[in-house]
């Protein structure tokens, strides 16, 4: 989502034509984001304010992927969650009970109001045996005033205090991509990952066996690509360069 369809709160030029082409030509798609703060409905409304018409059902967040993963591992379990509505709603919808009393899992997500008391509770629960899950490994996030500590940094704090490493569900873990493809009923041979980050989007797509397309409208610059030990299938300036391919009637 960020860096591909929107950037710094504004629509990437041509992203509306790209999304409209996906709709008009019946191309199944999901918009992925590692941000677990918002529900799909919230994100759909935020995208609509930039001029992008994307239904909530086409949004796939690290919170949804985490909730699905937990349901597959321990159905109807319990969790102590640090995060916002995107995470707590996804866990509730998966049948989880949120509690701080000997939960099966401590689940760490994104929030702009990390609480010292909540982090302390998480440390004590993980030290006592609760399994440690985090929605995504991103160490920082953007804000108008500069960088903010994000899920990965807070997870490192809990790990340093407990000696327990979390399992990160979000990108670059290909699990998030595979669960998304299962949601679409898609196959790796006919699915493409389009992203703006070499260290998350491209590696997740490669490890999931997909064709990968890097767009230069977000985090990764063209000069950075050769620094990585893997390469995307293609590099384009933005999703506007992909509209003609989406409109191609061939399967």
Image: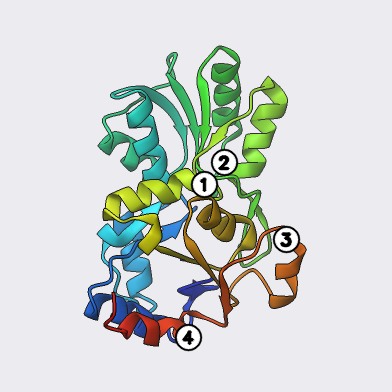
Mark 3: secondary structure: loop
Mark 2: secondary structure: loop
Q: Which residue is mark 1?
A: 111
Whether residues under marks 1 and 2 lie with C-beta atoms below 8 angstroms apart, the answer is yes
Cα gap from disc 1 to disc 3, whole angstroms: 30 Å
- Name which quarter of the figure residue 217 lies in: bottom right
Q: Compared to 23, does 208 lie above or below?
A: above
> Mark 3 or mark 4, which is nearer the start of the sequence?
3
- Name which quarter of the figure residue 191 lies in: bottom left
**Nearer to the camera, 133 or 51:** 133
Q: Which residue is mark 2?
A: 114
Q: Which mark is residue 228?
A: 3
- Name which quarter of the figure residue 124 lies in: top right
**Residue 128 location (% of width, % of height):** 56, 12
What residue appears at the point 29 percent right and 58 percent down from the top-left corner? Answer: 41
> Mark 2 or mark 4, which is nearer the start of the sequence?
2
Q: Which mark is residue 241?
A: 4
Task: Select label 1 or label 4 by which is in front.
Answer: 4
Task: Select label 4 or label 2 by which is in front.
Answer: 4
């Amino acid at each position: 989502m960020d860096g591909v369809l929107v950037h710094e709160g504004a629509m990437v030029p041509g992203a509306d034509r790209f999304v409209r082409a996906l709709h008009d030509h019946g191309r199944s798609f999901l918009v992925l984001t590692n941000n677990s703060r918002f529900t799909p409905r919230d994100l759909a409304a935020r995208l609509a304010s930039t001029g992008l018409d994307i239904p909530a059902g086409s949004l796939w967040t690290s919170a949804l992927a985490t909730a699905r993963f937990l349901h597959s591992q321990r159905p109807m379990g319990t969790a102590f969650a640090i995060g916002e509505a995107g995470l707590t709603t996804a866990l509730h919808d998966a049948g989880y009970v949120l509690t701080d009393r000997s939960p099966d899992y401590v689940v760490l997500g994104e929030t702009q109001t990390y609480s010292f008391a909540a982090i302390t509770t998480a440390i004590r629960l993980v030290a006592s045996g609760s399994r440690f899950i985090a929605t995504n490994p991103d160490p920082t996030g953007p804000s108008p005033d500069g960088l903010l500590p994000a899920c990965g940094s807070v997870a490192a704090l809990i790990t340093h205090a407990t000696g327990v490493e979390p399992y990160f569900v979000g990108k670059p873990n290909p699990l998030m991509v595979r669960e998304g493809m299962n949601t679409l009923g898609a196959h790796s041979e006919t699915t493409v990952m389009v992203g703006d980050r070499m260290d998350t989007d491209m590696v997740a797509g490669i490890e999931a066996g997909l064709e990968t397309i890097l767009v230069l409208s977000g985090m990764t610059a063209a000069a950075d690509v050769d620094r990585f030990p893997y390469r995307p299938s293609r590099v384009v300036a933005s999703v506007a360069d992909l509209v003609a391919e989406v409109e191609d009637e061939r399967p």
